[in-house]
Amino acid sequence: MRPFLIAASLVGLALPASGCGSTGTSVDPPPNALATVADTPITVDQVRALIPDDPLPPVMVAGGYSGPWREALDLAIRDELLAHEAARRGIGATTRAQQIATLITREQRETTGLTVDGITEGEARAWYAERRGLFGNVEKADVAWAEFTDGAHARKVMDQAAGTDQPTFQRLLRAGGAPKSGTATVDDHGKGADPMIARATYAIGEVGGVGLSADPQNGRWWVVRVERIAFQQVTWDEALAYRVKSALAAYRQDEHLRRLADSLRKKWPVQVYEDRLAGVITTEELR
């Protein structure tokens, strides 16, 4: 069974908005701005336009999703930095989006290993071996889980459990007051546990990983930790090699753009108005 796709996955291009350059209310932001790149404001409306119609993924993996508003703001900051750099390089285009796309295309063309053709078979096999969970084919997984009736509380427990060991995870569940908890063995057809627990298991895809699946219409959220996982034997063929190389190329492209945008912050400082962002998140995400 294939894992569910989640936000901030391999193709995420976000930058950490809460990093260097962030600020609170000590600096008055321009009207309706959540951030500035140099003197260019990034407004609430700009960020809202980048949020998908259904912003919440069916499954979240700890450390992989920071919420629709922060991820959209990160993307807006990245794009503004790339637009500044494209203009500095003299890249002209009909639209700002085309200008950014031209810069990205040049970066991909001029940097080794960012395309499928630039990735060797050995690189692809090694990357695949380390990230089997991204490609599905789970045979069996043992998991620990807890069910909550409050989504914000479940998210808090998931974030606290990220990177912890099994005893710590169990202590967090007890301290979190989960109404229900237990263990399960999930097979390749999702049997052995609630389907939402199976969804989280396939998305996590690695031992020690923690995730959360949600059924908000029925007021149920599950925090899941994978204790053991085994994958089906898969024949390495041309089709699988292409899938892996495509995923690795996307990952490398994202990392390259992240490093580029990070370096551009030295030329065009970024300020994020955290208090205003927190207010928008409270109003828009938690309503």
Image (tube, rainbow, N blue to C red):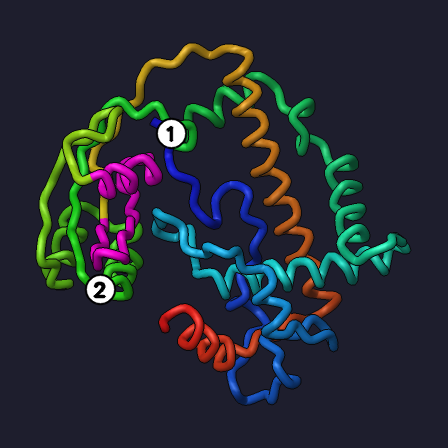
- Give me the disc on residue 12: none
Residue 142 occupies quadrant:
top left
Q: Is residue 48 magenta?
A: no
Q: Residue at x 46, y 49 (%)?
A: 7
**Which image quarter holds the C terminus?**
bottom left
Going by the numbered disc 1, the residue's amino acid type is: Arg
The image's mark for residue 2 is 1
Total marks drawn?
2
Q: Which residue is labeled 2 in the image?
A: 150
Crowd band around label 2 with a 10 angstrom C-alpha radius: few (<14), some (14–19), many (20+) = some
Stretch of the chain drawn in magenta:
195-223
Please say if 242 is above or below 197.
Answer: above
Q: Dot 1: what SS?
A: loop
Q: Is residue 11 left or right of residue 112?
A: left
- Tell me which numbered mark, 2 or 1, is placed earlier along the sequence: 1
- Disc 2 from disc 1: Cα separation: 28 Å
Q: Nearer the viewer, residue 211 or 281?
A: 281
Left or right? Give the position of 285 relative to 182. right
Asked where in the image residue 201 lies, by quadrant, the reply is: top left
Report the quarter where the N terminus lies.
Answer: top left
Q: Amino acid at mark 2?
A: Asp
The residue positioned 44% from the left and 72% from the top of the image is: 284
Neighbour class for label 1 at 10 Å: few (<14), some, many (≥20)? some
- Residue 201 in magenta? yes
Q: Identify the element where label 2 is drawn.
A: loop
Q: Name the residue rendered at 12%, 59% in the picture.
A: 178
Left or right: where 19 falls relative to 66: right
Picture coordinates of residue 229 (x, y %)? 25, 29
Q: Residue at x 50, y 65 (%)?
A: 69
Q: Please indicate whether residue 195 sits to the left or right of residue 184 in the image.
A: right
Counting from the top left corner in percent of width and height, residue 213 is at 29, 49
Residue 86: x and y in percent read 81, 55
